[in-house]
Image (cartoon, grey):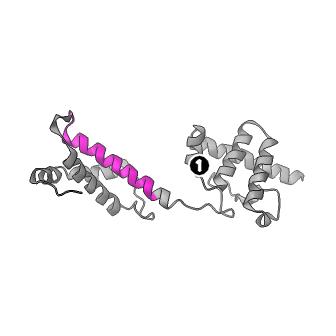
Amino acid sequence: MAAMSRQETELVERHLYLVRDTVLGTVTINESVQGLGYDDLYQTACEALCHAAQKYREDGGASFPTFASVVIKNRLISQCRKATRIQRPLEYMDAPQSDGSDLTFAETFPDRNFHALSDTDIFIFLDEAGKRCSGITRKGMEALALKCRGHTGVEIAAHYGAPPNHVAAWISRAAKMLREEKLTA
């Protein structure tokens, strides 16, 4: 970043309150994720405020607080995306599913010897199971395969253009079908 002029420095000092307000009003602080703690977000917002002061033009049609708030908010959103992309949580096959059920991903498969299956076998199994069903259950099989590939429920929901809670319901329906097949097999 280039050195700031005296006028830009004064502009930043007068509007420093925007940093705290925008941080607290824009993102959820998560101290357990590197880059999403309050101090990290505050620093990012301060840098954005300085950037806004350097880029602001009075003839642009917006007041400085309005312009700076948008710049800070956009920078915070970018910081959050970067932090979550780098530190995407792993979902293990023996961990509980995020749909609220007590089942693990491994327990949704009818084969008792699950750990002997390769990733390819699992995806083939889910594809074959998806062909035996239709509608929401088929979407659930597809969503379960995407989850196994490491996608989050929010990403899957965006892919389908549906709310995340619908994706969780689809996966739950697919898991129910797999459990019922396991009981009849």
Of all residues, the one furthest to the left in this rendering is 6
For image coordinates 15% across by 38% down, the residue present is 58
Disc 1 on helix, strand or loop? Answer: helix
Front position in the image: 181 or 126: 126
82 sits left or right of 25 in the view: right
Q: Does the magenta stretch include residue 171?
A: no
Identify which residue, 124 or 183, lies in the foreground: 124
- Which residue is tagged 1? 153
Is 81 magenta? The answer is: yes
- Residue at the spot 67% in from the left edge and 54% down from the top edge: 101
- Binning the other alpha carbons within 10 Å of mark 1 as few (below 14), some (14 to 19) or many (20 upward) gives many
Q: Where is residue 73 in the image (x, y as percent from the top left)?
A: 33, 47
The part of the image, by quadrant, that contains residue 42 is bottom left
Q: Which residue lies at the image location 72% right of the left edge and 60% below the top edge?
A: 119
Residue at the extreme top: 61
Exactly how many numbered labels are in the figure? 1
The magenta stretch spans which residues? 61-83
Q: Provide residue 105's location: percent of width, then percent of height.
A: 70, 58
Most frequent secondary structure within the magenta stretch: helix
Instruction: Say which quarter of the image contains residue 94.
Output: bottom right
Q: Nearer the viewer, residue 147 or 24?
A: 147
